[in-house]
Amino acid sequence: MSTKFALSALGLAMLIATPAFAQKPAHRAAPAPYASVAAPVIADGQYVGADPDPSIRFELQRDSATYTTSN
């Protein structure tokens, strides 16, 4: 009977202590908006395109070999 009581007490103590160990959600600042200016992308002296989104400009720069016709 003391084993059941000890396990019950341990379980109850764990249920009570669990919220104490919980972390509050971290509030992150929203990322700054990128400039809405369509910056040109030039690769190997050739105009590839322009886009205001930095990730799209990176893709244009990265894939510039696909857009050229000099094989």
Image (cartoon, helix red, strand yellow):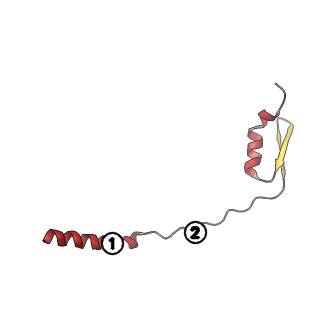
Secondary structure under badge 2?
A: loop
Q: Quadrant of the C terminus?
A: top right
**Percent position of residue 55, x then y:** 72, 49
In the picture shown, does residue 55 fall above or below 70? below
Name the residue beneath numbered marker 1: 15
Asked if residue 40 can be seen in this view, the reply is: no
| Residue at position x 18%, y 73% in the image | 5
Q: Is residue 60 left or right of residue 14?
A: right
Camera-side residue of 67 and 4 = 4
Secondary structure under badge 1?
A: helix
| Residue at position x 80%, y 54% in the image | 52
Please, what is the three-letter code of the amino acid marked with disc 2? His
Distance from disc 1 to disc 2, alpha carbons, whole Å, reads: 27 Å
Instruction: State which quadrant residue 48 falls in.
Output: top right
Check the image and name the residue furthest to the top.
71
Q: Say which label, 1 or 2, has the lower sequence index.
A: 1
Q: Quadrant of the N terminus?
A: bottom left
In the picture shown, does residue 2 fall above or below 53? below
Camera-side residue of 14 and 23 = 14
| Residue at position x 68%, y 62% in the image | 31
**Percent position of residue 30, x then y:** 66, 65
Q: Residues within 10 Å of mark 2 (few under 14, many from 20)?
A: few
Camera-side residue of 28 and 56 = 56
Please, what is the three-letter code of the amino acid marked with disc 1? Leu
Asked if residue 24 can be seen in this view, the reply is: yes
Q: Are marks 1 and 2 in contact (CB under 8 Å)?
A: no
Give residue 27's mark.
2
Total count of labels: 2
